[in-house]
Image (cartoon, coloured by chain):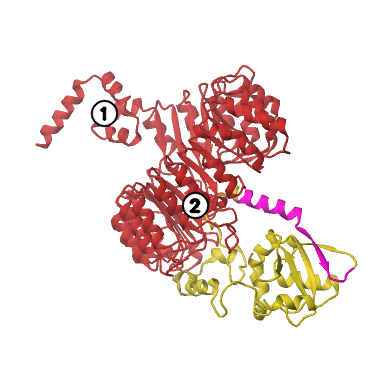
Chain colours: A red, B yellow
Amino acid sequence: YLSNTSTLSTKMAKSFPEEVLEHVFSFITSDSDRNAVSLVCKSWYEIERWCRKRVFVGNCYAVSPRILTRRFPEVRSVEIKGKPHFADFNLVPEGWGGCVYPWISAMAGAYPWLEEIRLKRMVVSDEALELISTSFCNFKVLVLSSCEGFSTDGLASIAANCRELRVLDLRESEVDDLSGHWLSHFPDTWTSLVSLNIACLGSEVSFSALERLVARSPNLRTLRLNRAVSLEKLHNLLCRAPQLVEFGTGAYSSELRPDVFSNLAGAFSGCKQLKGLSGFWDVVPAYLPAIYLTCSGLTSLNLSYATIQSPDLVKLVSQCHNLQRLWVLDYIEDIGLDALAASCKHLQELRVFPSDPYVVDPNVSLTERGLVAVSEGCPKLQSVLYFCRQMSNAALVAIARNRPNLVCFRLCIIEPRAPDYLTLEPLDAGFGAIVEHCKELRRLSLSGLLTDRVFEYIGTRGRKLEMLSIAFAGESDLGLHHVLSGCESLRKLEIRDCPFGDKALLANAAKLETMRSLWMSSCSVSFGACKLLGQKLPRLNVEVIDERGSPDSRPESCPVEKLYIYRTVAGPRVDMPPFVWTIDEDAALRV
Amino acid sequence: MEMERQNDLNLKATELRLGLPGSDEQPEKRNNKRASSEMDNSSDGEKGDQECAPPTKTQVVGWPPIRSYRKNVIHAKKTEADAAGMYVKVSMDGAPYLRKVDLKVYKSYPELLKALQNMFKCTIGVYSEREGYNGSEFAPTYEDKDGDWMLVGDVPWEMFSTSCKRLRIMKGSEAKGLGCL
C-alpha cells in the first residue's frame, strides 16, 4: 500500500513540470504552508526551496546563516528575531548575544538581490548597517524593531548608499544619537521613500532636509517624527504630504498662538487619507482640537506618551468612531474607558500603560471596571494589554463571558501577587474563565496572586495558546507540569520568580523540542537538572545565564539565575559571553 | 513613595494614613507570602546583587514589565516636574511676612512639619486623626484645589502635595475650633 502511494505521488510530482509547480507555489505565501509544501516529497522540497522568496527566522540561534543560505538560494526578504522577549525588561544581561553581523555577512555573499531586512531585538552595529548599504543594490526595506548597537553614523551609510530604499523604520530601537546630520545624506535624486519612522531618535534632524525629503517623496505614506520636531513646524510637512496615511507628531506643545493653531488645523484637515496618528509628546490640550477633523477617519491612535487628563482624552476619543486600535496612558481612567466603550464600536486592540508605576498608591482612578466596560461595549475587541492596580475574579469572569473572541490578553496588576481585592482570594478562577471562554486565545500574560490551580486550567483549556508569560505565580512544580503537559500549541513560555524547579522540567523534557523557547529566571531549576536536559536532548541548546561565575563553582543542586532553552539545528552557540554556559552532549560545561 | 514609609516607621504613633485604626496595611501581608515561598530560601544571587530594598516595598528588576523608553518618558516627566519645584506660600498668624516652601523637597508630613517649625520657630505638635493638632499652640492648614481650607495630615502625602495651593499656620485658639470637627 505504502509503496503504491509513494509511486503515485512521485508520478503526480513528475507529471507537472517544475515551472508549473513553481508557479503554483508562488501563490502560497504563508510560512507554515510553505513548510508543509516542502515536506510532501523530495522534488517538492527542491522546487519549493528554489522559489522561496521570504524567510522568517523566529530565533537567530535556531538555525545558522549558512544553513539558511544553502537551503534557500533566492531569498529577497528576511525577518530575524534575536533576544528573548524578557530582554525588553532588562532581564537579559548586556552582551548576551543576538548579533546580526554574521547574518549580514553571509547574506551579502549569497543574496545580492536581497530587498528587505526586518530585525527584532538584535544587536546591529554600524558595520552591519554599512555592509547592508553596500551589499544589496536593490535594497528597499529596513525595519529595526527594538534593536540596539548602532549610531546615526550607521544610518548615514544607509541614507547615502541605498538608492532604492523605500522603508526606514527604527521603531523603538536604542540608537546612539550622535547628530541629526545623517538625514542629509539622502541624495536629492532619491524620491522613492514610502515610510520613515525616526520616533526613537533624540536629537534634532535638519528640518530643511526633512522638508525637502518630504517634498520629493510622492509615495510617502508613513511619517513618524521624533520629539525634537516642534509643533509650529508640523504644518510645513503636512502640507507637503497630504497623501499621508500614518503620521507621528513630535512634541505637541507650544505657546498658544492662533496662527499656529489655524495652520496646524488646516494642514491636518488637508490630509484626507489619514488613518493613524501617534507621537503627542508633551501635549498641550489646547492644541488637540487641531486634529478633530481627522478623528472620524482614524483607525489607529497612539496616545501612550500623551500626559493629558481624562476629560481631554474623552473629548478626543469620542469622536473616533472608526477607531480600531488605541494605545493610551491610564490617565484615561475608568470614566474615559466608559466613553471609549460607548463611542468606538470597532475597537479591536486596547493598550493601557501606567503613568506612574512605581508609586504604591494609585495616582489615577483606573480600575478593573474600565476594562470590563470596554469588554462589554466593544464587540470586536480581541487584543488587550492592561496595567492596573486592582482586579477581581468577578471582573475577569465578566470579561471572559463578554469577549470570547479575545486572541491576546495581557494583564499586569502592578503589585506582584495581588489577590482579588474584593475577596482576597487568588485570581485562579478569573484567569481560568479567560482560557475557558476565549477558545481562540493565542497569547496570555498572567499577574496577581495565583496558585497551581490556574495552571491546571491553562494546561487543559488553553489549546490554542502559543505564548504564555508568568511572573510571581504558582506554588510548586505541579504548576509548571500542568502547562508543559498540556497547552498543545505552546511555542513560547517565559517565567520569572516562580517556585518551579527540576521535576516538572525533567518530566516534560520532550515538550521543549516542540516549542521555540523557554525562559526561566529567578526560579528553582538546579544546575544538575540543566546538565541532564542538555545531555538528554541534543537538539536543544540549554543556556545557563549566571552572573555569579561558573556553575561548576557551586553545588549542582544550586539553582541557576536564568535559564534559556531553545530548539536548534545549528548546534551550540559560538559567540557566548563569559556569563553564559551551555551543556555538551557529554554534560561538559562549555563556555 | 517608598521613602514615605521608611519615615513613618519612626513615627508609628502619629502614622498618617487612611484606614480604620488597627487595620493591617497591605505590605505586611505581602511580606508574609514572600517568606513562605520556596524562592526566597534559594540562594538567589540576582536580587541580592541588584539593590538594597527598603523593607516594605522591594524594587524588583524588570517589574512592572515596561520597556525602558517608556520608563525614560515617565522618569523624564518626573525630573522635569522635580526641577520645576512646587513652591507654595506659607503664612503664619502674627508673622510680619509670608514664606515659601517647595513641597517637592519633602516626602512626608513629619518632614514638612519639622521644616515649618524650624522656619517659624513654633511648635505645631502632634497630629491625631481624632483630635487634629489639639493641645498645641499652632495648627497647619492648607487651601486645596477647590479653595477649601483643610487640616494638614488627613490625606495621603501624595494627594496633599498635589492639591495644596498654599499653607497657613493657624494660631492655637482658632485651630481649636477645627480640632473639634
Q: Residue at x 72, y 55 (%)?
A: B82
Q: Chain of mark 2?
A: A
Residue A283 visible at all: no
Give the label on residue A44, or none: 1
Q: Position of residue A77 (x, y in %)?
A: 44, 29
Can residue A427 be found in the magenta stretch? Answer: no
Q: Is residue B28 left or right of residue A588?
A: right
Name the one closer to the observer, A433 or B181. Answer: B181
Q: Chain of mark 1?
A: A
| Amino acid at pointer 2 | Phe
Q: Which residue matches tag 2?
A: A86
Local crowd at mark 1 within 10 Å, few (<14), some, or many (≥20)?
many
Does A458 appear above or below B73? Answer: below
Q: Is residue A231 left or right of residue A272?
A: right
Q: Residue at x 40, y 30 (%)?
A: A54
Residue B140 visible at all: yes
Q: Position of residue A75 (x, y in %)?
A: 41, 27
What's the magenta region?
B71-95
Q: Secondary structure at mark 1?
A: helix
N-terminal of the pair, mark 2 or mark 1, is 1
Q: Residue at x 41, y 47 (%)?
A: A377
As measured in the structure, the alpha-carbon distance from the residue carrying label 2 to the one carrying label 1 is 38 Å
Can residue B83 be found in the magenta stretch? Answer: yes
Name the one closer to the observer, B172 or A523. Answer: B172
